[in-house]
Image (cartoon, helix red, strand yellow):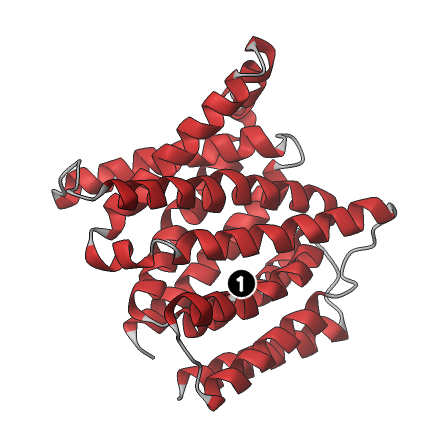
Amino acid sequence: MSIGDICAVASALFWSIAVILMRVSGLKVPPLPLTFFKIWVAVLLLMGTLLWEGSPWVLDLTGQDYLRLVVSAVLGITLADTMIASALNRLGASLQALADCVYSPVIAFVGLVMFGEYLSAWEMMGGALVVSGVFVGATRTVEIKKPNDLWAGILLAAGAHIIMAIGILMVRDLFREHSLVWVSTFRFVVAGVVMFLWVALGGRKKLRHLFLGFRMRETWKFMIPMSILGPFLATLFWVAGFKHLNAGRAAIFNQLSTVFIVILAYLILKEKFTARKIAGVLLAIVGSLVVAMH
């Protein structure tokens, strides 16, 4: 496995643990305050990393580059992360993984359209196995009594991953040409500021609600680790994977997060671990091995 492969798999693992913690936190903290909290914890960690590596605070980018970064941040963080938190509240961890199946094909398709990147036959075969595995393993893992919650949650999760894919690929060249930490920091700062300004337009009451996560200290034991593992570590390893790999290959390894989520949901959240999940895990592992070996 290359350094890019390792980064992509590590990102999937970190993200999976963060999703479980997000699910627990989401039982008490609504999606918007939860997302706002983790964004600013990530900003603090990223700024600390910038200081440590001695990177400049401002880069000599064009106005168009800065505009792309702003749009990428609003789409891929402000909007997509809030949608994921909302989907988790409706679906639970395992069933949300069903909607995550769109991630790999969407990334591969966007990579083809934007960069003309093609997958090899082996990579397409491995990707098909991974997508098949997560589809089989994630289906019917949580019983949803309200049909509206089921379909709303699936649409939110699927839509979030589509938006996230577009948001990251539209600035991939900037990640490759400049400091990974600086670009990530800029995107998170923009995402947090935009969310603050958007909510502030609704008045003081809504703004107070936005800071709910900072006031509920009893949830910090879940929310702080969630913010470290998800927005900070998972994001850095995620974009590092895209920096070293073509979009489709990175996405296939990232898709392993669904497998990890199913396993962790069983161990931590006590969600059912069925024969379908076992079959899904095996298919996804074989698929990732096919990609890694070719």
Any part of residue 210 in sight: yes
Which residue is depicted at the point 53% across and 26% down? 213
Amino acid under label 1? Ser
Q: On the rendered structure, is 30 left or right of 237?
A: right
Residue 222 drawn above or below residue 98? above
In the rendering, at what x and y percent does residue 51 appear?
17, 38
* Residue at disc 1, secondary structure: helix
Q: Indicate the quadrant where residue 52 lies.
A: top left
Screen quadrant of the C terminus: bottom left
Tell which of 163 and 281 is nearer to you. 163
For mark 1, does the 10 Å Cα neighbourhood hold few (<14), some (14 to 19), or many (20 or more) residues?
A: many
Tell which of 31 and 161 is nearer to you. 161
Screen quadrant of the N terminus: bottom left
Q: Which residue is mark 1?
A: 257
Q: On the rendered structure, is 120 left or right of 263?
A: left
Q: Indicate the quadrant where residue 275 lies.
A: bottom right
Which residue is depicted at the point 44% across and 51% down? 167
Q: Indicate the quadrant where residue 272 lies.
A: bottom right
Tell which of 163 and 123 is nearer to you. 163
Residue lying at the far top in this picture: please name it.
204
Q: On the rendered structure, is 151 left or right of 93?
A: right
Which residue is depicted at the point 47% across and 23% down? 196
Which residue is depicted at the point 65% across and 30% down? 28
Residue 78 drawn above or below residue 270? above
